[in-house]
């Protein structure tokens, strides 16, 4: 057994997307600023919210392999490529990954809905990743100088020695010593690394976010918040409503912005303090323009934004 760990570094925007999903949508809070948590939550649809729930079930940290792909050793893979791979994944592959993760017995209750309708779950999860990344990608691009700086820092530690000190300073939830990791939180415990190399994956995430892959024979993957990420968090970009109002009128512009996630007509009327008859009229016009969808569930009518509406709002973001 070697005394000094072998370090390398990889860049994976998909793991940043996963960390944001887990914090903002699945309920496992890891230090994401509240403004960003609410912005991300509001921009993911109902199917996406349902799909991510198993990722943060109390007492569990294991997820199927298709949710957390290996970070690329040879270069950065786009989030869109990961989304495409999820959409093309055969439903049986999710079932196989769930069995590998949890064994041949009964699945934990929080993963059973996904196993019952694997194609539906994959579609919802891929949609959630895409909606999260549409909001977070500009921030990821701004983080490039911090990521480049971290690449240099890891390289210096690997060449000049001192990887033990680097590993010990990654995150307050990680303690390293004698080729072992002591982790606090959802993956709490002592993990023996043996002679495996360690691949570090800096993320743009809350200060307490850590994602580990410990089951592979050749390498251990540790994703952690990139140092200095706190300097990047700012108010999430919002649509330029003045310009949007000039296009479609102030009421419809405000209405379209308000439907960050599916809402009932009565909820919209209450939030916007507009008579239900007026809400119905303006929703009719937005639906005719293919900007919203309406779905009756029992006695309530639920309204959601279309992909076309999201693209329109993106054009008018500050």
Image: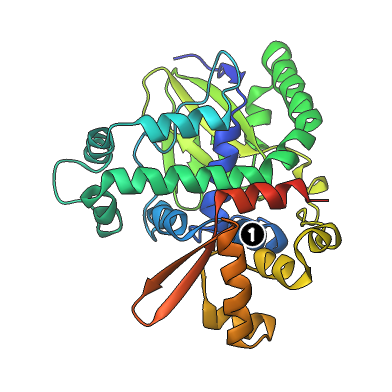
Q: Visible in this render: residue 210?
A: no
Q: Quadrant of residue 109?
A: bottom left
Does 87 appear above or below 115?
A: above
Q: Residue furthest left?
A: 105
Instruction: Indicate the quadrant containing the N terminus: top left, top right, bottom left or bottom right.
Output: top left
Total marks drawn?
Answer: 1
The residue at the point 45 percent across, 52 percent down is: 186
Residue 62 x, y percent position in the rendering: 36, 44
Q: Nearer the viewer, residue 163 or 143?
A: 143
Residue hosting label 1: 37
Identity of the residue drawn at 34% across and 48% down: 121
Q: Is residue 208 left or right of residue 121?
A: right
Front residue (pair 194, 227): 227
Give residue 169's quadrant in the image: top right
Position of residue 225 measured from the top left corner of the image (x, y, whole percent): 66, 41
Along the line of sight, the residue nearer the viewer: 234 or 10: 234
Q: Residues within 10 Å of mark 1 (few under 14, many from 20)?
A: many
Residue 65 image-quadrant placement? top left
Q: Is residue 204 above or below residue 218?
A: below
* Residue at left offset 54%, top offset 56%: 44
Across and down, in percent, residue 47 comes to 42, 56
């Amino acid at each position: 057994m070697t005394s000094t760990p072998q370090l390398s570094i990889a860049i994976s925007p998909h793991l940043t997307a996963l960390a944001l999903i887990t914090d903002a949508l699945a309920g496992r809070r890891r230090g994401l600023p509240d403004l960003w948590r609410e912005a991300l939550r509001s921009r993911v649809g109902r199917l996406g919210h349902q799909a991510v729930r198993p990722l943060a079930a109390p007492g569990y940290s294991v997820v199927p392999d298709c949710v957390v792909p290996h970070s690329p050793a040879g270069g950065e893979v786009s989030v869109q490529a990961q989304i495409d791979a999820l959409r093309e994944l055969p439903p049986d592959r999710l079932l196989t990954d769930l069995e590998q993760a949890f064994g041949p017995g009964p699945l934990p209750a929080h993963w059973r809905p996904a196993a019952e309708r694997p194609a539906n779950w994959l579609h919802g999860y891929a949609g959630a990743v895409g909606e999260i990344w549409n909001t977070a990608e500009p921030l990821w691009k701004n983080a490039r100088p911090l990521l480049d700086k971290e690449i240099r820092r890891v390289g210096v530690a690997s060449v000049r020695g001192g990887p033990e000190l680097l590993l010990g300073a990654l995150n307050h939830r990680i303690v390293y010593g004698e080729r072992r990791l002591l982790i606090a939180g959802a993956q709490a415990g002592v993990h023996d690394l043996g002679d495996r190399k360690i691949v570090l994956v800096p993320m743009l995430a809350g200060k307490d976010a850590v994602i580990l892959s410990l089951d592979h024979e050749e390498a251990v993957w540790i994703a952690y918040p990139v140092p200095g990420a706190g300097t990047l968090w700012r108010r999430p970009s919002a649509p330029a409503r003045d310009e949007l109002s000039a296009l479609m009128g102030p009421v419809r512009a405000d209405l379209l912005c308000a439907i960050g996630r599916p809402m009932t007509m009565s909820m919209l009327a209450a939030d916007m303090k507009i008579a239900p008859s007026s809400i119905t009229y303006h929703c009719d016009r937005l639906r005719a323009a293919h900007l919203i969808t309406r779905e009756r569930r029992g006695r309530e009518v639920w309204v959601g934004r279309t992909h076309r509406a999201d693209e329109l709002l993106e054009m008018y973001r500050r």
